[in-house]
Amino acid sequence: MKKLLASCWLAFLPLALSAQSTSPGSYWQQEVNYSIDVTLDDRHHTLTAQEEIQYTNNSPDQLTFIWFHLWPNAYRDNTTAFAKQQLRNGSRKFQFAPQDQRGFIDQLDFKVNGQPATLSFDPEHADMAKLALPQPLAPGGKITITTPFRVKIPASFSRFGHVEQSYQITQWYPKPAVYDSQGWHPMPYLDQGEFYSEFGSFDVRITLPANYTVGATGVLQNAEEQARLTQLATATAAKKAEDYSKDLTFPSSASETKTLRYVQDRVHDFAWFADKRFNVLKSAVTLPSGKQVDTWVMFLNKDVAKWIKGLQDVNDAVTYYSQWVGEYPYTAATAVDGALSAGSGMEYPMVTVTMPSAIVHEVGHNWFYGILASNERAYPWLDEGVNSYIENRVAERDNPNAGMFESVLTSGKASTILGVEGLNATALNQVPYQASASRGLDQAVSGPSAAEYGKINYGIIVYTKTASLLKYLAGYLGQEKFDAAMRAYYQRWQFKHPAPADMQTAFEESTGQQLDWFFENMLQNTTRYNAAVGDIQVTNDQVKVLVRNDSPAPFAVPVATLNAQGEVIETQWTPVFGNGEEDEETQLDFRREGVAAVVIDPAYLTPQLNRRDDKLKLEGSLPRLEPLRFRPLVSVERWDRAAINWAPVLGANTSDKLMLGAAFYSSPLVPKRLSYLAMPMYSFNRNELNGIGTLNLNILPKETARQLITGVTVQRFERYVKVEPSLTLTLPKSAYNAPSTWSNLLTLPCATRILM
């Protein structure tokens, strides 16, 4: 799933201004094969279905019961885990929804090998139930489980739902939970938090009015429907973007029905999307092996130009993920326009519902979620974060400015105002993480489950921080070695359930390097990393650079020499060094010719919060001082210049009347350890200078508290001076899941007024 992150970092501005590895030889997993007949009633928004499951116990354990997910029940009432999470994350839409907009699953009647079986609902979660088996299922044994079921399709509150007669049928059928070496994994449905499912095959027959167009998991078996889709695609391809009408009304449903059959093996879910208004486009990709993959987009009469381009995005995703990760194993990939309410897109095997801007990301999930089927609820970074890294590479292959801040980087005026001209997308992609970490809000990439992240942090940490750290690792290893390791990971764990330690093992074996400093430290902790140029020794033909690791954990950094114009001459990586011990410094030797300065991390790959000590000039009385510039509103810290932010200020009170002035302050996006505000204001009534001055010390304790800010504010108005020291303490984890604010603050002010 793709979260909308483009404006996440702006949320900081108002605040500022006010597992163990598994050996493949011992690995096993269950097999679950489905046969489902389902009928859509688009007048009452219901599904009626019959399901048959062939369950194979490949575990060494005897099973006496099977946990089932009945996720439509997440929409039943306000007591479900989904409803509570929605409220905690600040959404009241479902909380006050009328009953006719809610959903459920009922009319269940389970039988195992033809014998009635008892289903016991979990007392806390209506969308989880335990099926007691009439006889124990021995290792290697198989059983057939059958049940009818009916589903009331909810309105579009999350992934599963409908908007009038546009249907997103996902997480809709009774589904066994995963049983693996750690036991059962039953989980309630959540909006923030995804899934973990067993691989198998699907044979699904969908009956619905004949004028619906469907995008689904699997291979369509109906020749006449294949011909109809091809005909629709031909007609759509003949149109230009301006030829489409703006009409989004629903045509009447046909009186006759059709039954569409889809089959697919080696997948762990089945989703389908139905709408009578879909336009259809079709293309194909030929992979290096010669295999052809059909690609489709299905979309409405809106954002037409983006969807026409979207077909190429599907092609690009299939092409480059196959090249960098591993060959796409299925015969088709489809992107569908839909009324999704959970982020900007959601992935399912072979099909995704998405906004056009998220197509590459969502199609990419066929690899990270679909084929490498990790436990998304426990390890969300293994699919969302790794996928985001590859998605960024696809976007950046011919556009270095691609990403969430592309509009800023490509706008000459905006980039100059914000002081980001000349920066790449990598530098700006670090800002959300830096803004979070500098406020003590950072969370580890690997460790917290999906539900343990706050709503904003889920996007910042799981998606952007993970992608940035993987790009850093690729820089350290070299792109070829990184890609080879990723392909080795894919080859070993495709169609299985890898954990983080499995990815680490694959990377270490492929590269021949110990990478615990990255996988077990950098990903699993919230260490605040910092490196600095300690000293430079210059000889006739060499520049010897002493690099200092000021962090409590080891890491490596790239170091470059620059010419007088600030251009990179030579780049070297340090070894992994540091740990608060004797090896906290390392030396690199560079060629002397043309060198004017040395800089750490010129391309902004490392997860550092402080860039001010990254550069050192070879000559000059102030070798660390960079040109100072005034920037309106906000600025991004960079190693090649210093900035003071400013903004015009207009104020008034009953005594001083109208006052005009300016505020000068340190960057509010990423607060430094010492921050300041100087806001002089001129009173035209008294012809006097008034204003406010603030100096704050930002302390980020390792334990006991999330953030401690101690400071003093001095104000002068109406010929009074007010001096106000303050101490602001934010308790640990108090902000991660707050619905409307990031801070639960304990503020202890004291003030003194001095008559002038």
Image: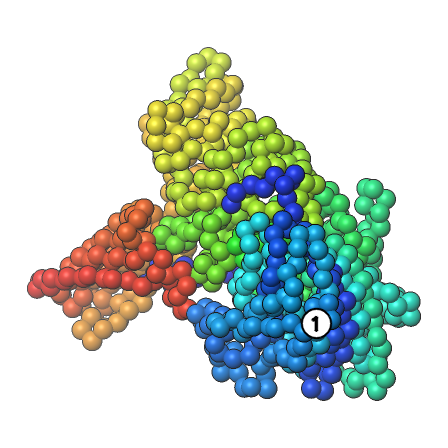
The quadrant of the picture occupied by the N terminus is bottom right
Q: Nearer the viewer, residue 652 or 62?
A: 62
In-image side of 24 versus 182 (left or right):
right
> Of the residues shown, which amino acid type is indicated by label 1?
Gln
In-image side of 738 versus 459 (left or right):
left
Residue at point 56% right, 72% down? 120
Locate residue 309, reporting x and y percent. Answer: 74, 59
Q: Give the answer, above or below, for where 575 lies relative to 178.
A: above
Q: Nearer the viewer, residue 157 or 135?
A: 135
Q: Give the answer, above or below, for where 556 lies relative to 645.
A: above
Residue at point 65% right, 38% down? 25
Residue at point 86% right, 68% down? 229
Q: Give the answer, above or below, for where 151 lies relative to 441.
A: below
Residue 336 shows up from this direction: no
Q: Give the answer, above or below, for where 542 lies relative to 431.
A: above
Q: Nearer the viewer, residue 272 or 646?
A: 272
Q: Which residue is labeled 1 in the image?
A: 115
Locate residue 48, reporting x and y percent. Answer: 72, 79
The quadrant of the picture occupied by the C terminus is bottom left
